[in-house]
């Protein structure tokens, strides 16, 4: 009987904690995300505007936009490129000649993801391929804050779409 009472109390405590913390977590992650669409191509990605609060112009190539954090410690580039050469993710990545010290690499028939460290930053690059277009997100953020950025980078990456 006593064991059952302890078990019920523990379950109630866990449920109460979840109910109290869940709204704070949802607010921190969900309230200020907006869909950015590249006007010229229709490609889109979810951008956390509470994190990347400043827009700083266009990417170096193609269409899209660059975003910065208010403190300028992190940045996000959304980029749409033509794929006139009809490159696969593997051939496009090879042409870019990425550094040999890549920590994470995943290449599929439809996209690639590469990530590594540069100075005190983690750089992350995902490009989706479809038809004659390539849509990419490039993110640079403080390596010391990796755990805090993991969910943000994952949501941005998974939301990337051609249209």
Image (cartoon, rainbow, N blue to C red):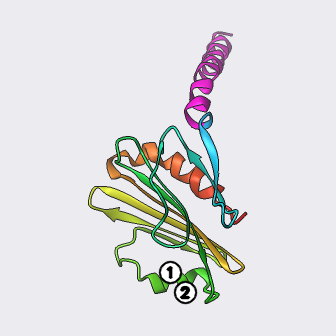
Left or right for 115, reference 117: right
The stretch of residues the image draws in magenta is: 1-29
On-image quarter of the C terminus: bottom right
Task: Give residue 54's mark.
Answer: none
On-image quarter of the N terminus: top right
Task: Give residue 91's mark.
Answer: 2
Of all residues, the one furthest to the bottom in this rendering is 85
Question: Which residue is at 63% across, 13% downward?
Answer: 9
SS at badge 1? helix
Image x and y of residue 67, in percent = 47, 52
Question: Which residue is at 39% across, 71% downward?
Answer: 102
* Residue occupied by mark 1: 93
Image x and y of residue 73, in percent = 34, 48
Left or right for 158, reference 119: right
Examine the rendered structure and indicate whether residue 106 appears above or below residue 150: below
- Answer whether residue 25 is magenta in the image: yes
Image x and y of residue 82, in percent = 61, 79
Judging depth in this view, the residue of 44 and 118 nearest the camera is: 44
Q: Are marks 1 and 2 in contact (CB under 8 Å)?
A: yes
Question: Which residue is at 60% across, 16% downward?
Answer: 13
Decide: few, some or many residues near mark 2? Use Cα within 10 Å; few <14, some 14-19, many ≥20. few
Judging depth in this view, the residue of 157 and 17 nearest the camera is: 157
- Which image quadrant is residue 133 in? bottom right
SS at badge 2? helix
- Answer whether residue 151 is magenta in the image: no
Image x and y of residue 2, in percent = 64, 10
């Amino acid at each position: 009987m006593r064991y059952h009472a302890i078990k019920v109390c523990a379950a109630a405590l866990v449920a109460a904690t979840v109910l109290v913390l869940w709204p704070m977590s949802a607010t921190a992650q969900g309230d200020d995300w907006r869909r950015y669409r590249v006007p010229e191509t229709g490609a889109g990605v979810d951008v956390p505007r509470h994190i990347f609060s400043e827009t700083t112009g266009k990417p170096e190539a193609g269409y899209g936009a660059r975003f910065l954090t208010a403190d300028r410690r992190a940045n996000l580039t959304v980029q749409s490129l033509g794929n006139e050469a009809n490159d696969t993710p593997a051939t496009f990545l090879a042409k870019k000649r990425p550094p040999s010290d890549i920590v994470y690499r995943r290449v599929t028939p439809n996209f690639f993801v590469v990530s590594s460290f540069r100075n005190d930053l983690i750089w992350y690059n995902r490009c989706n391929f479809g038809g004659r277009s390539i849509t990419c997100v490039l993110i640079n953020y403080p390596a010391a804050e990796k755990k805090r950025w993991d969910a943000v980078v994952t949501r941005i990456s998974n939301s990337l779409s051609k249209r």
